[in-house]
């Protein structure tokens, strides 16, 4: 599973977030209690979530694969609108600042209230053109926004500088982009070339540390990687060997288990005692921070295991850093905390 296989994301207040992966897997944090209970108690045989959004004041909307929907909103006006329009099929509800919202229906109609004037104006102008409809929209907690239309044209206003500069640099806009209605700095963007950038709280970044959280002791995650700007195959002739003490962590904490439930501490002891071998692990991917010459990896759990087991040499693949990797890296690189017992 790679970041490019994220299906959709929602941000809310108080570090609330939700991630839906292409394989149906879900991750979330600090959701409103009513929504948490709805998702946590939902039987796996029932239709899966295909869209979910959060507001700054614990409002939420969810749509399932069979077209059924659920919501909890403070605004009576919005509640009545959702009830009245439910027969048309509500595709998306996008929440913004100060109880603003935008609703997208399956018949391509839209309804909104309180959205920024420039976005209001752009939607009116574009939808006045023949067969042009709103395709993607994101609202932020400070009134900034991003909108993309069915003809591929897009516009934005007031986005964080890093995201603004990247949009200026690219010709095709974002494939998908999510902002937080609760603040002016959180975002996640999937670009058309499959790369991604994001900025949010540590718990969100840790959940997206795909290689780390989803790594296996017997196989690595398949994804396209690059070296010097060119795609490469991770074959044996590309393996290098480094001292794990010369490789730095890319985050400040890790979970105490691999994705399959195996304890990292027990794995370390087995490796240190010779009951398993370094050959049982796939090589970790590392990239170089050219400004410092330091090596970093996203396989933080395996790196911890190697260091604590006292290994002096481990196999690695040298790759280009994923886009935005050094921007979203956290921690000092030399030490890492373990979450859980």
Image (spheres, rainbow, N blue to C red):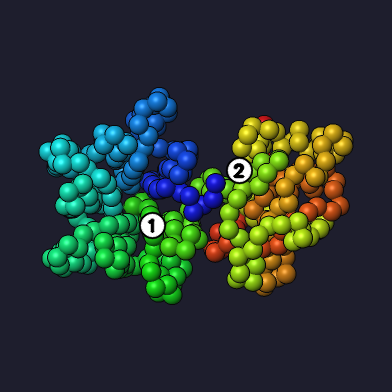
Q: Tell me the quadrant of the picture where the C terminus can be found.
A: top right
Gap in angstroms between the C-alphas marked 2 and 1: 23 Å
Give percent across and percent down for residue 315.
78, 54
Q: Nearer the viewer, residue 132 or 59?
A: 132
Question: Is residue 326 found left or right of 92 in the rendered image?
Answer: right
Give percent across and percent down for residue 235.
71, 57
Residue at left offset 35%, top offset 41%: 50
**Residue pointed to by mark 2:** 213
How many other residues sit within 10 Å of disc 1, few (<14), some (14-19) or many (≥20)?
A: many
How many other residues sit within 10 Å of disc 2, few (<14), some (14-19) or many (≥20)?
A: many
Question: Is residue 225 found left or right of 10 in the rendered image?
Answer: right
Give percent across and percent down for residue 124.
15, 64
Q: Mark 2 falls on what kind of element?
A: helix
**Residue pointed to by mark 1:** 176
Give percent across and percent down for residue 222.
60, 50
Q: Nearer the viewer, residue 221 or 185?
A: 221
């Amino acid at each position: 599973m790679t970041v490019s296989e994220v299906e959709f994301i929602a941000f809310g207040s108080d570090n609330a977030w939700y991630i839906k992966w292409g394989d149906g897997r879900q991750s979330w944090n600090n959701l409103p209690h009513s929504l948490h209970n709805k998702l946590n108690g939902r039987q796996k045989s029932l239709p899966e979530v295909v869209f979910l959004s959060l507001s700054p004041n614990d409002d939420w909307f969810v749509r399932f694969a069979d077209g059924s929907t659920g919501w909890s909103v403070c605004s009576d006006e919005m509640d009545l609108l959702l009830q009245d329009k439910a027969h048309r099929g509500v595709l998306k509800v996008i929440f913004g600042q100060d109880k603003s919202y935008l609703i997208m229906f399956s018949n391509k109609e839209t309804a909104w209230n309180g959205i920024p004037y420039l976005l209001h104006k752009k939607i009116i102008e574009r939808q006045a053109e023949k067969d042009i409809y709103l395709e993607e929209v994101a609202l932020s907690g400070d009134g900034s926004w991003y909108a993309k239309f069915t003809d591929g044209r897009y516009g934005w206003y007031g986005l964080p500088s890093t995201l603004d500069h990247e949009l200026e640099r690219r010709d095709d806009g974002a494939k998908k982009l999510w902002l937080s209605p609760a603040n002016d700095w959180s975002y996640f963007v999937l670009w058309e070339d499959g790369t991604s950038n994001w900025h949010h709280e540590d718990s969100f970044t840790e959940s997206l540390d795909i290689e780390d959280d989803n790594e296996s002791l017997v196989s690595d995650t398949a994804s396209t990687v690059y070296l010097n700007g060119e795609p490469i195959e991770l074959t044996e002739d590309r393996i290098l060997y480094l001292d794990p003490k010369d490789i730095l962590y890319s985050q400040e904490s890790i979970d105490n288990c691999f994705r399959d439930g195996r304890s990292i501490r027990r794995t370390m002891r087995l490796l240190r005692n010779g009951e398993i071998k370094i050959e049982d692990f796939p090589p970790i991917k590392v990239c170089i921070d050219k400004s410092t010459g330091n090596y970093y990896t996203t396989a933080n759990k395996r790196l911890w295991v190697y260091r604590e087991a006292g290994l002096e040499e481990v196999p690695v693949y040298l790759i280009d850093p994923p886009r935005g990797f050094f921007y979203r890296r956290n921690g000092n690189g030399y030490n890492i905390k373990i979450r859980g017992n």
